[in-house]
């Protein structure tokens, strides 16, 4: 490595660090504002925004010249999601294969995983119910990728009017199109959200 290349790498690392810090600050501000919001729905929306911003900020620490180490990102976020689940509730388990994603795809996938895990924790494990949320990422034989978020919670009926109106499912389906993805839900013995996509 030449001295010029070393300097460029240092500058790129410094830029990623600063960008990650900016995202963290924005996330903290949204979370602080949520604590002062008077309406429960406003609080919920601000917390959602804080979580989404925080997830995107975490990506910055895993950017490299050839893309984003998405598995390293998931490994960083798994304990974060576990803390959000709360003591004695769901555990978060990670089963992933090494995947480098492009910048745009990584951001899209980060928001999808964030939403699916948040939905599993919010709707699958209530009234003291405990269990496991598994995040699985693998390469298929056809060269595409499969991302699955699987929980053993109480499940729900995806054909019900309330399920169809959920912002989270609409949001994930909209994002799936950005990675040429096919999104499916299975609701037997919990919920399995499965995305097959291309990079």
Image (cartoon, grey):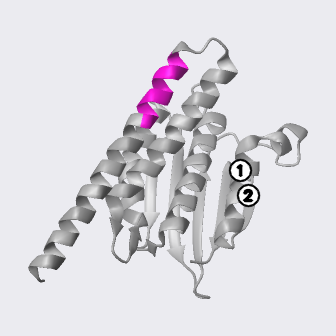
Left or right: where 30 falls relative to 59: right
Quadrant containing the C terminus in the rendered view: bottom right
* Vertical side of 109 occupied by 39: above or below: above
- Residue located beneath label 2 in the image: 174
* Vertical side of 159 occupied by 145: above or below: below
Residue 166 is situated, as x and y percent measured from the top left of the image, at 77, 41
Question: In which image quadrant can residue 162 be found?
Answer: top right
Q: Are marks 1 and 2 in contact (CB under 8 Å)?
A: yes
Quadrant containing the N terminus in the rendered view: bottom left
The residue positioned 52% from the left and 56% from the top of the image is 110
The residue positioned 67% from the left and 59% from the top of the image is 175
Q: Secondary structure at mark 2?
A: helix
- Say if the magenta span includes residue 93: no
- Residue located beneath label 1 in the image: 171
Residue 112 is situated, as x and y percent measured from the top left of the image, at 60, 55
| The residue stretch that appears in magenta | 26-35
The residue positioned 68% from the left and 51% from the top of the image is 191
């Amino acid at each position: 490595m030449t001295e010029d290349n070393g300097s460029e790498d240092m500058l790129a690392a410094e830029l990623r660090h600063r960008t990650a810090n900016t995202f963290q600050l924005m996330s903290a501000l949204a979370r602080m504002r949520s604590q002062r919001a008077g309406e429960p729905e406003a609080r919920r929306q601000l917390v959602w925004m804080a979580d989404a911003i925080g997830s995107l900020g975490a990506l910055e620490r895993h950017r490299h010249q050839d893309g984003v180490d998405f598995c390293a990102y998931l490994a960083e976020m798994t304990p974060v999601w576990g803390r959000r689940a709360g003591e004695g509730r769901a555990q978060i388990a990670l089963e992933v294969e090494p995947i480098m994603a492009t910048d745009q795809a990584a951001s899209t996938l980060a928001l999808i995983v964030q939403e699916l895990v948040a939905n599993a924790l919010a709707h699958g494990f209530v009234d003291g119910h405990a269990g496991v949320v598994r995040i699985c990422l693998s390469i298929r034989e056809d060269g595409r990728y499969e991302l699955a978020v699987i929980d053993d919670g109480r499940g729900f009926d995806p054909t019900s009017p309330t399920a169809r109106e959920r912002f989270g499912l609409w949001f994930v389906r909209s994002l799936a199109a950005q990675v040429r993805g096919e999104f499916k839900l299975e609701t037997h013995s919990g919920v399995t959200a499965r995305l097959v996509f291309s990079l």
